Image: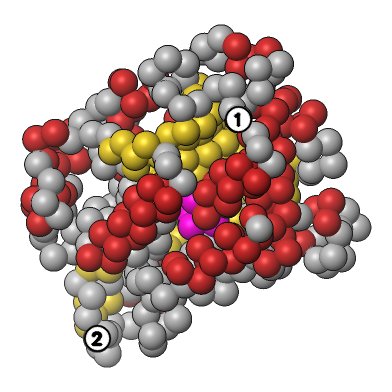
Amino acid sequence: MTTTSFDRMWADLEPVGRDAGSGGYRRYAWTRTDHDLREWFAAECATRGLDLVEDRAGNQWGWWGDPDTTPGVVIGSHLDSVPDGGAFDGPLGVVSALATVDALRDAGFEPDVPLGVVNFVDEEGARFGIACAGSRIITGALDADRARSLTDADGVSMAEAWRSAGRDPKTLGRDDDTVRRVGRFVELHVEQGKALALAPDGSEDLGDPGRAVAIGTDIWPHGRWRVDIPGEANHAGTTRIADRQDAMIGLATVIQAARSYAVGLGCVATVGKVHVVPGGVNAIPSHVTAWLDVRGRSEHVVHAAVDAVSSEAGRSGATTTPESWTPTTTFDTGLVGRLREILPDAPLLGTGAGHDAGILATHGVPSAMLFVRNPTGVSHSPAELASTDDCHHGVTALTAVVTELCTGKDPESMSDAR
Ligand SMILES: [Zn+2]
């Protein structure tokens, strides 16, 4: 019954926002596709008799029980995507949460504390450039004026996008009442790497049901740095190699150094965006700006890698400037401990990707995550995958978690968990 409802919902969502050419999804905030997804979510809540509430960022919450009497347990994720994203990042958590409600109903379960299902808006930031915008706005991590003035690639502001979607952008902003209703948040998500698909000896093993679902422990520290590399513009045909100051050579050093220090220190480093001046095929670059993204298990490792790249790049006159820094987000140890009791066989997993659960955790809401095995290890691409069996294992795990967390005998559920 539950697996049937999961499969039915999954089939419903499959065509929404899918690009026929790439096979990937283009589900961006406050577009027609987003509207269709929101209507779908609202209808699924209505079918189950959940009270639908929209907060001041436009996040949708379907409540079973009244969270104004006792803060509730919330499950869910997001329905938006990156450009040409996969089917699972986000929707897996929302569909699994709704299927969990069905499983609880089938079992005749009545929660002692309110249960909420959430669809966070604009998690990927694909349109306005800020990831987790919905959770950042309600927690105050993203200022309302700044959010309203963010623009998309066509110059449309978030405020204008709200108006086009029939909403009043003046109402957008921090929403303490909404956050107060969340006693605990458990976000189920497709794994965005291959850890669960690999057995402890490193061989691929997709058959072990004990590795279908992991418990998320933390989100790795993460930073972005801008590297400015100087050069001297000159003619590509008439300037002798010995006379050149080619900024692109400095970029090559940065890219190679990022790779080798990441390997040496056991972290990940990416140069995914560069800006070349003057940008002519027949002109020696006079300036290159590169953006370096580094993430790792510890803040120490990330800083060590960036310091090493920066000093190597500095030899050719490059300067490295920090642009953003997100420290380690450790999920609530009490909640993670409860998940370990409920799912004793589940491996523990840290992640290098940001999530709404991380934003809520940083704001002090006890939060944690469950990850479902991804056999390709690929994410943010149409190759992203989870097998149907593993999706069903995810629903079973989430159902077990909610059953325990929403039962009166759970010590933390009897009082405001914060
Ligand atoms: Zn996601």
Q: What colouring does the structure picture have? A: secondary structure
Whether residue 271 is situated above or below residue 167 in the rendered picture: below
Q: Residue furthest right?
A: 201
Residue 74 horizontal/vertical position (percent): 50, 33
From the viewer's perspective, tell me whether residue 385 is left or right of residue 164. right
Residue 302 horizontal/vertical position (percent): 57, 40
Circle 1: element type = loop
User: Which residue is disc 1 drawn over?
Assistant: 110
| Residue at 68% over, 13% down | 411
The magenta segment: 90-94
Residue 333 horizontal/vertical position (percent): 66, 22
Whether residue 300 is situated above or below residue 255 in the rendered picture: above
| Residue at 60% over, 56% down | 190
Determine if the magenta segment contains residue 93. yes
CB at disc 2 and ligand 1 closer than 8 Å: no
Q: Which amino acid does label 2 sit on?
A: Asn
User: Which residue is disc 2 drawn over?
Assistant: 282
Closer to us: mark 1 or mark 2? 1
